[in-house]
Amino acid sequence: MTNLYEHSGGDEALHRLEELFYAKVLADPVLRAVFPERQPHHVEHLTWFTAESFGGPDRFTRELGFEYVISAHRHLKITDEQRERFVALYLEAVDEAGLPADEPFRAAVRSHLEFGSEVAQRNSHAETDDQLHPLREVPRWQW
């Protein structure tokens, strides 16, 4: 069986997904506090992270490292509403980007989003390193 990266369509499809998703969060009033303005490399970094977590190239780890993602979420104080909206908008973008619609793929994407958004939310409230989620590397998501 192919991995999620190959099944999704690889870098081109994931970049299309992240571009659509990022436009959604920037325009969303619920997520405005978390995504206040467009960052020049955010789509590229999101693409790298998703590609790596789906079994593709390890560019995110090599170029940025997982500490980067921890720092990005630190002190954002992500609410349940923001986390849920993030997941909903991402799933909308998956549809709009034309990624595979088969249930095994969609279930894997949903579980990846739920897990990742929970890690980000926890890290966003951590006052000390001890309060951070123990994850310290890009997770390799499977079917």
Image (tube, helix red, strand yellow):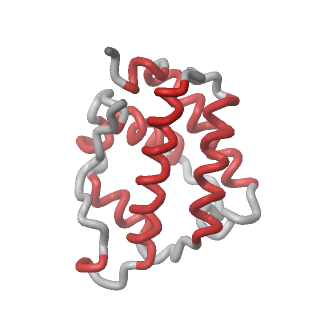
At which x and y percent is residue 108?
44, 36
Instruction: Name the image quarter holding the C terminus.
Output: top left
Q: Is residue 127 above or below residue 142?
A: below
From this viewpoint, which residue is outermost toward the front?
103
At which x and y percent is residue 32?
69, 65
Residue at left offset 35%, top offset 63%: 70
From this viewpoint, which residue is outermost toward the bottom?
127
Q: Is 81 on the left or on the right of 7, as rendered?
A: right
Q: Is 8 on the left or on the right of 81, as rendered?
A: left
At which x and y percent is residue 81?
64, 67
At which x and y percent is residue 141?
33, 38
Residue at left offset 58%, top offset 73%: 79
Residue at left offset 39%, top offset 32%: 51
**The image quarter in which residue 33 lies:** bottom right
Q: Is residue 106 above or below residue 13?
A: below
Instruction: Name the image quarter holding the N terminus.
Output: top left
Q: Is 120 on the left or on the right of 66, as rendered?
A: right
Number of numbered discs present? 0
Residue at left offset 70%, top offset 47%: 24
